Image: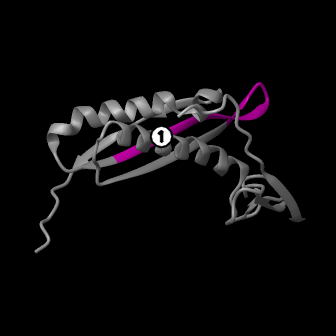
Amino acid sequence: MNLPDEHIYDVTIDWKEGRIGTMSSSRLEESISVATPPEFPGGVEGIWSPEHLFVASVSSCFMTSFTAIAEYSKFNFLSLKVKSEGKMSREDGKYVMSQITLMPELIITDEKYLKKGIRLLEKAEEICLISRSIKSEIVFIPEIKVEEVADIA
């Protein structure tokens, strides 16, 4: 399957009031509210911020990269949870997202697949196009756990 060399992803933000808007795409059914984070003047509690979305783009890209690699490699796993944190700091007097910490937790059923699981997690972090497209430092702290699958009788 040949993919085109370019893809376009459209996003529209409709301002509602104050520092709040609604984000949507012509290709998606759901829209979400976005706002200035509460750490800034006029910021709003409880609404997704650009900073949250920035971190979310890295962690969701990691998740989709891992699941694609796992499927291709016929690697079975029970679950994957990707916790992430973004650190905003001042550089040269301006705020930047200086660091993203990815903390994936992969649960597998057999200890003999630990090394392969780590390799696939590392490969997913390496190929994530969002991580490759940003200048933030990516800190990668993977964890794999082995859980027995209970027989259901």
Amino acid type indicated by mark 1 = Leu
- Residue at point 26%, 33% (across, down): 116
Query: Which stretch appears magenta?
Result: 89-105
Residue 130, image quadrant: top right
Using residue 16 as the reference point, say whether residue 66 is left or right of it: left
Does residue 20 appear left or right of residue 54 in this picture?
Answer: right
Tell which of 25 and 85 is nearer to you. Answer: 25
Q: How many marks?
A: 1
User: 114 or 83: nearer the eye?
Assistant: 114
Position of residue 108 relative to residue 8, above or below, is: below
Q: What is the secondary structure assignment of the residue under circle 1?
A: strand
16 up-or-down from 12: above or below: below
Pinpoint residue 67: horizontal percent, then vertical percent: 42, 44
Please check the rendered image and state whether residue 92 is part of the magenta-colored stretch, yes or no.
Answer: yes
- Relative to residue 13, is residue 68 drawn left or right? left
Q: Residue furthest front?
A: 1
Residue 111 x, y percent position in the rendering: 15, 42
Q: Which residue is mark 1?
A: 102
The structure residue drawn at horizontal position 68% and vertical position 47%, both measured from the top left corner, is 51
Question: Is-magenta flag for residue 52?
Answer: no
Query: Residue at left 17%, top 60%?
Result: 149
As drawn, the residue found furthest toward the bottom would be: 153
Residue 140 in view, yes or no: yes
The residue located at (15%, 56%) in the rendering is: 148
Residue 11 in the image, given as x and y percentages of width and height = 78, 51
Relative to 128, say whether 147 is above or below. below
In this rendered view, identify the residue nearer to me: 142 or 42: 142
Colour mapping used in the image: one colour
Q: Main secondary structure of the magenta part?
A: strand
Q: Is residue 41 visible?
A: no
Q: Position of residue 48 (x, y in %)?
A: 68, 59
